[in-house]
Image (spheres, grey):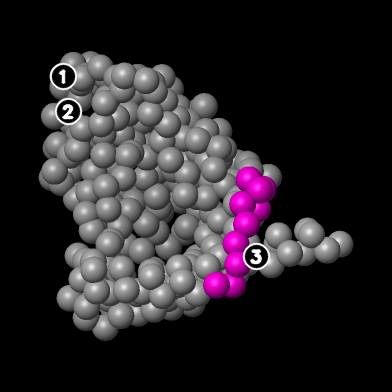
Amino acid sequence: MTNTHPQRPTLAVALIVKNEADNLAACLASVADWVDEIVVLDSGSTDATVSIAESLNARVFINADWPGFGKQRQLAQSHVQADWVLWLDADERVTPELRDEILAVLQNPPADTVFAMPRLSWAFGRFIRHSGWYPDYVLRLYPTQLTQYDDSLVHEKVLLPPNSKIQTLKTDLLHYTYRDMPQYLAKMSQYSNLWAEQKAHEGKSSSIGQAITHGIGCFLRMYIIRRGLLDGVQGFLIAVTNAYFTFAKYADLWVKRNNNAHP
């Protein structure tokens, strides 16, 4: 890999993807002309995802044997050659303002520091600025040798080494999330199922009473406490569906544990 910006550390963008042909070109176009490397780990796409990534000069790798989100990100990072890595999802976009802020950081990068950035999500026709969705700080930028993601099946997190620091960028990362309700419901169902699987594997338990309580609590927290009502109809949809899937994941955990107890 050639450093096209010798005055600063090299920077890679890394993604894990599957069937992201509708999103990937716009995502990679937002970074292609200013990063030193793009690493894409595909999980077995059946659409044009791989060819799109290759056409935009990404280094593409494939691992269709899905190990969970955390381990898949670890595998993707093992292919990164650059000094720093910026993680993106295919439905995210780096604005010119965020690009400039990232490049300014890399001019004189602090040691042992992980950077978080606020993420602004677009859903069902508007940017969601309440509902607990914003500013939605995500840890996405760090020195490649400093750390990596944990092993979680879902809701994976960047590990923070001892004595490391978190600094926060000011500029939003744009997140063009769910196109429509079927896509939203399918992804929420996937996340809730993986959550229940992970908790069952950890020996956690639940009850239907807990499922009801957590579901109601989720609605009140998102719609009232976190002011989802200010996000209009979209805020109501988000609160209701999140409440349902919160109920569903705790109920699914109860089912999994109950089935294990009675073969």
Image quadrant containing the N terminus:
top left
Q: Nearer the viewer, residue 231 or 186?
A: 231
Above or below — where is 174 with respect to 247?
above
- The answer to which quarter of the image holds residue 228 is bottom left
- The answer to which quarter of the image holds residue 179 is bottom left
Is residue 217 rendered magenta in the image?
no
Residue 34 visible in rendering: yes
Residue type indicated by callout 1: Asn
Residue shown at 31% from the left, 34% from the top: 141
| Main SS category, magenta section | loop
Residue type indicated by callout 2: Val
Residue shown at 79% from the left, 59% from the top: 261
Q: Residue beneath label 2, please?
A: 105
* Residue found at the very far bottom of the displayed protein: 233
Q: Residue beneath label 1, please?
A: 108
Point out residue 189 in the picture as x, y percentages from the top left corner.
Answer: 54, 68
Q: Nearer the viewer, residue 28 or 124?
A: 124
